[in-house]
Image (spheres, rainbow, N blue to C red):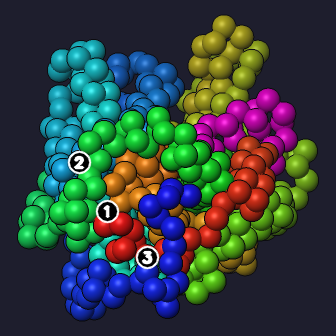
Amino acid sequence: MPPDSTPHSPHSPHHHKHTEPVLSKHSLWTIIAASSAGTLIEWYDFYIFGALAVTISDVFFPADSGATGLLSTLATFAIGFVVRPFGAIVFGALGDMIGRKYTFMVTLLLMGGATFVIGVLPGYSSIGWLAPALLIILRLGQGLALGGEYGGAATYVAEHCPDGKRGYWTSWIQTTATLGLFLSLGVILLCRFLLTPDQFSAWGWRIPFWVSLVLVFFSWFIRRRMSESPLFQAMKASGKGAKNPIRESFAHKQNLRLVLLALFGATAGQGVVWYTGQFYAMNFTKLTLNIEASQTEIIVGIALVLGTPFFVFCGWLSDRIGRKPIMMAGCLLALILYYPIYGAMAAAANVADPARFPPAGPVQTLGEPKVEHFAADTAESKPARTVTVSKERQTFTDGTTNTITTTQTDADGKVVTTRKSTIHLGSLSSTPALTLVFLIWVQVLLVTLVYGPIAAFLVELFPTRIRYTSMSLPYHVGNGIFGGMVPFIGALLVERTSNPYSGLWYPMAVCALTLVVGTFLLVERRDVRLHEEATN
């Protein structure tokens, strides 16, 4: 614990009421709304790239690249995760030197600008390999911006909050990642609904990127009217500002220890629980259980809607019982419950025996699908070598039907049979669907336990002079690296072991590490008086 951030009791003689600014609830809600709107928009910008990965691969890579183009697009998407820690360092240092408000104004404009340019960038057919090269540069810009945005928004909100209520007020920031995902999917689905498939593929996919510019302008207009954080102003007035936040954060042994404790004792476990409960659960349902793609997204969406209020509840609860016990409980429950939950998901989807998990079996719907038509184009008959079901390349023909293509190749790799089936989706009111909603909702509750209090915890762990820099790095390493690798490592483990549950080993191992480090080495700091610490 840094010497200048020792927590004081509210009744301590060191407690001076006048150091804590008194803000009305209306003012706090204005600050929360302005900060959350910008952060939500940045998450929206970050997610639409991933949601449109298949379309983007068709536009920015050669038409005959197939799976290679898609993998390249997914790798470009992953670049945004990898550079987030660098954005945390760069913008964190700027935020500690020149102010929180101006720094996350810059990150908002950088993210919005990069996203809009992706929406107008010519494709491979127009400018060749310059198209994917520029796409990667823009994706780097998005990742850097997101790396600086969250720490700035969380710090800004926390430094306006009254002591004793930081968990509650900062928890509203924690809802923005999920809400950003909802917003991105909503805009994309609206565009698909209003346009024909050909129109969407040709130019309609660009509209969600263009919408970003409107959202960014709205958020910028609100943020520009806000004043600087009172704690930052008080620190600057007292001459306590950091001249080199990066050196103070990572070169000083005592603070570096706190950064590492925050990473391995909190954010690493939080990151893997977050990505397992939302992204890995979706992939497992869609790819391993072979549930139809749009049904899977609706099931996960319902679970997220039902779980989102608990982010705020867990933040509120952490003000009363502490951040540490809630976060450690989330890691412990994840460690205990993941295997039973995913076993129950398999049973609900009628795939109870792990040995019978089909790696490329027929896609199933929850309810009775109605086959509209079946077409087959058969070439010269030869001994078949492989049969591939292109589940990842399903083409939605409208809001209620789905086309599945099966291709059979001969010993020379030539296509001998192509079959297409168009089906109506089954009912989402069936018992298996409701069971899956419940099981994923339980995972979202685990996410709220680890994620709801994390902003307040990180803010309280570091002194004001280097808070933005120090808290941003462990957060983005824990989420961008440890958490962001959950889908990839999970898929790799399943492929190597042929065990459909082995993808859970990685998040469970990280949870175990965080549970041990956090339980024995983290110090609870919910009673720290930030408004005194900023000037002492």
Helix, strand or loop status at disc 2: helix
Locate residue 428 relative to residue 3 in the image: left or right: right
- Residue at 30 percent across and 39 percent down: it is 244
Q: Main secondary structure of the magenta part?
A: helix
Report whether residue 417 is seen.
yes
**Residue type (three-letter) at the residue carrying disc 1:** Ala
The residue tagged 3 is 529
Circle count: 3
Residue 484 lies in the magenta stretch: yes
- Residue at 27 percent across and 15 percent down: it is 129
The residue tagged 2 is 97
Residue 276 lies in the magenta stretch: no
Which range is magenta?
A: 481-504
Q: Kindly identify which numbered label has been placed on residue 492.
A: none
Considering only order in the chain, which callout, 3 or 1, is on the residue closer to the N terminus?
1
Considering only order in the chain, which callout, 1 or 2, is on the residue closer to the N terminus?
2
Q: Position of residue 141 (x, y in %)?
A: 27, 36
The residue tagged 1 is 153
**Residue type (three-letter) at the residue carrying disc 3:** Arg
**Residue type (three-letter) at the residue carrying disc 2:** Met
Helix, strand or loop status at disc 1: helix
Locate residue 398 relative to residue 99 in the image: left or right: right
User: Which of the two marks, 3 or 2, is nearer to us in this view?
Assistant: 3
Q: Position of residue 485 (x, y in %)?
A: 59, 40
Q: Position of residue 370 (x, y in %)?
A: 60, 63
Name above or below for residue 268 compared with residue 309: above
User: Circles 3 and 2: CB distance less than 8 Å?
Assistant: no
